[in-house]
């Protein structure tokens, strides 16, 4: 939303959005040690246990956001220039989205009710209740409105996860998969060898193939991987939603003004790291 506002000259939305982003990044840094590219999720669990006070940090973010989201709703939805730049611009139909493989907010903006978290649940999403937000017209404004509403749904999901999170270890205790704790490496030769073998040789995966997809903020993010029984993938392909969604640009731009190109591309919200192949 911040970059969408920046692209269309809504500087206030840009600054407010980055302010909230900074709070979230600060929390992620406290938990993972990094603001971005966290490398926190590992085979068998996560890299480290949650720090003391993490729950208070989550609740602080959840309490801070609702009144600020209400401000954004007033700031943007009641701005006639914003609505004129987005409403009726860059429209696409559900049939076109399905033919092109478009997913995420772009598909849902057409009124097509599809979300992998609900329709093909993974992790603990089968235990979580949330609404799938859909639009009506498939235009830039619907895509913006869906992303704003999905922040509220994300907060509902996080609160339920806080309530349902079980106690226990943060990773499985399988020495073939998980390395020893960092402190043990300085004390034990066996731990040092174990750590060395995990990070140099890896672990062997049974021969076969698998495709797993999640509902990312931009749509279906999937990974197809083939194993020949060794510790290295025989083949791997990442289905990046930004790469697929951008293929809809000829349909989105048809009949639009050149000046609308910025609004349309911004509403697709691509991550160019996914697009560069």
Image (cartoon, rainbow, N blue to C red):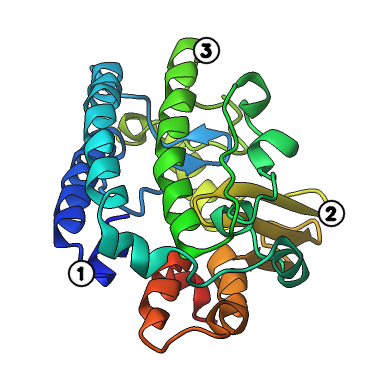
Position of the C terminus by quadrant? bottom right
The residue pinned by badge 3 equals 164
- Point 28% across, 19% down: residue: 59
The residue pinned by badge 1 equals 9
In the figure, is residue 50 to the left or right of 15?
Answer: right
Q: Earlier in the sequence, mark 2 or mark 3?
A: 3
- Point 58% across, 30% down: residue: 131
- Count of numbered labels shown in the rendering: 3
| Disc 3 to disc 1: CB gap under 8 Å | no
Q: Height in image: 129 above or below 250?
A: above
Q: Position of residue 58 (x, y in %)?
A: 30, 24
Q: Earlier in the sequence, mark 2 or mark 1?
A: 1
The residue furthest right is 208
Q: Height in image: 34 above or below 90?
A: above
| Disc 2 to disc 3: CB gap under 8 Å | no
In the figure, is residue 241 to the left or right of 119?
Answer: left
- Secondary structure of the residue carrying tag 2 is loop
Q: Height in image: 226 above or below 252?
A: above
**C-alpha gap between disc 3 and disc 1:** 42 Å
Q: Position of residue 97 (x, y in %)?
A: 69, 66
Q: Residues within 10 Å of mark 3 (few under 14, many from 20)?
A: few
Question: Camera-side residue: 195 or 232?
Answer: 232
Tell us which disc is closer to us: 2 or 3: 3
Q: Is residue 84 visible?
A: yes
- Secondary structure of the residue carrying tag 1 is loop
Q: Position of residue 157 (x, y in %)?
A: 49, 26
- Secondary structure of the residue carrying tag 3 is helix
**C-alpha gap between disc 2 and disc 1:** 53 Å
**C-alpha gap between disc 2 and disc 3:** 35 Å
Q: Earlier in the sequence, mark 3 or mark 1?
A: 1
């Amino acid at each position: 939303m911040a970059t969408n506002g920046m692209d269309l000259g809504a500087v206030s939305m840009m600054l407010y959005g980055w302010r909230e982003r900074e709070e979230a990044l600060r929390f992620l840094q406290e938990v993972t040690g990094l603001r971005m590219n966290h490398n926190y999720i590992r085979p068998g669990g996560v890299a480290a246990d949650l720090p003391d006070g993490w729950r208070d940090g989550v609740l602080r973010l959840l309490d801070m956001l609702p009144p600020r989201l209400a401000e954004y709703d007033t700031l943007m939805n009641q701005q006639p220039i914003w609505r004129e730049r987005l409403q009726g611009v860059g429209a696409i139909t559900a049939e076109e989205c399905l033919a092109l493989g478009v997913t995420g907010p772009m598909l849902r903006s057409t009124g097509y009710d599809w979300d992998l978290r609900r329709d093909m649940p993974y992790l603990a999403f089968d235990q979580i209740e949330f609404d799938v937000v859909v639009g009506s017209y498939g235009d830039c404004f619907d895509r913006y409105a869906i992303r704003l509403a999905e922040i509220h749904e994300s907060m509902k999901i996080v609160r339920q996860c806080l309530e349902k999170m079980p106690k226990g270890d943060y990773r499985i205790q399988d020495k073939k998969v998980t390395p020893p704790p960092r402190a043990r490496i300085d004390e034990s030769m066996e731990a040092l060898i174990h750590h060395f073998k995990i990070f140099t040789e890896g672990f062997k995966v049974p021969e076969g193939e698998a495709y797993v997809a999640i509902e990312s903020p931009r749509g279906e993010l999937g990974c197809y991987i083939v194993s020949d029984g060794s510790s290295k993938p025989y083949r791997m392909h990442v289905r990046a939603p930004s790469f697929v969604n951008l293929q809809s640009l000829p349909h989105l731009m048809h009949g639009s003004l050149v000046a609308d190109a910025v609004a349309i591309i911004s509403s697709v919200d691509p991550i160019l790291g996914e697009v560069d192949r």
